């Protein structure tokens, strides 16, 4: 793979990673549903695991509202048909009516499929703010 191909893939995945948060905040479920792989595992820092349909349903219903996402850093690494995004940021959400601001580190795995890059796995953990 050429350096320019790697840079293009890195740019595409970085852009999708960033716009995903905007779609979550705006509840743009049509675009979000195309980005989320049917076999998605979305693991929150408290151990809560959501499937693709659960992510979409919980955003639709207002159970989980993404109010703002402040990304501190990200890096993208590509391996074959996978691109891994590692990042840190503060997530301002409302869960079951309770406002939370949670500093997280996270890892996202995007898989290249016939539909383009899709998020197939995400895991986050709380960052200690001591």
Image (tube, rainbow, N blue to C red):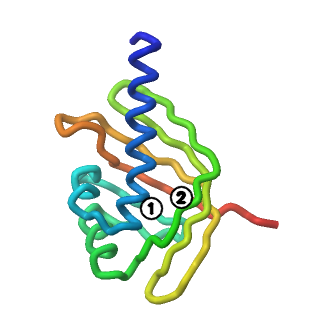
- Image x and y of residue 90, in percent: 61, 63
Q: Please tell me which of labels 2 and 1 falls first in the chain.
A: 1
- Find out whether the residues at labels 2 and 1 contact each other: C-beta distance under 8 Å: yes
- Image x and y of residue 2, in percent: 42, 10
- The residue at which mark 1 appears reads as 43
Residue at image point 38% right, 44% down: 16
Residue 50 occupies quadrant: bottom left
- For disc 1, the neighbor class at 10 Å (few under 14, some 14 to 19, many from 20) is some
Q: Which residue reaches farthest left?
A: 114
Q: Which residue reaches farthest top?
A: 2
- Image x and y of residue 88, in percent: 61, 52
- Image x and y of residue 51, in percent: 30, 63
- The residue at which mark 2 appears reads as 124
Q: Which secondary structure lies at badge 2?
A: strand
Quarter placement of the N terminus: top left
Q: Is residue 51 left or right of residue 85?
A: left
């Amino acid at each position: 793979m050429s350096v320019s191909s790697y840079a293009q893939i890195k740019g595409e995945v970085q852009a999708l990673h960033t716009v995903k948060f905007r779609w979550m905040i705006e509840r743009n479920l049509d675009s979000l549903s195309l980005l989320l792989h049917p076999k998605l595992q979305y693991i929150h820092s408290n151990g809560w695991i959501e499937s693709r349909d659960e992510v979409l349903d919980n955003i639709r219903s207002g159970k989980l509202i993404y109010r703002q996402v402040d990304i501190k850093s990200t890096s993208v690494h590509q391996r074959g048909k996978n691109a891994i995004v590692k990042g840190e940021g503060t997530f301002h959400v409302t869960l079951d009516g309770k406002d939370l601001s949670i500093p997280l580190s996270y890892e996202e795995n995007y898989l290249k499929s016939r539909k383009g890059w899709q998020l197939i796995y995400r895991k986050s953990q709380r960052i200690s703010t001591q």
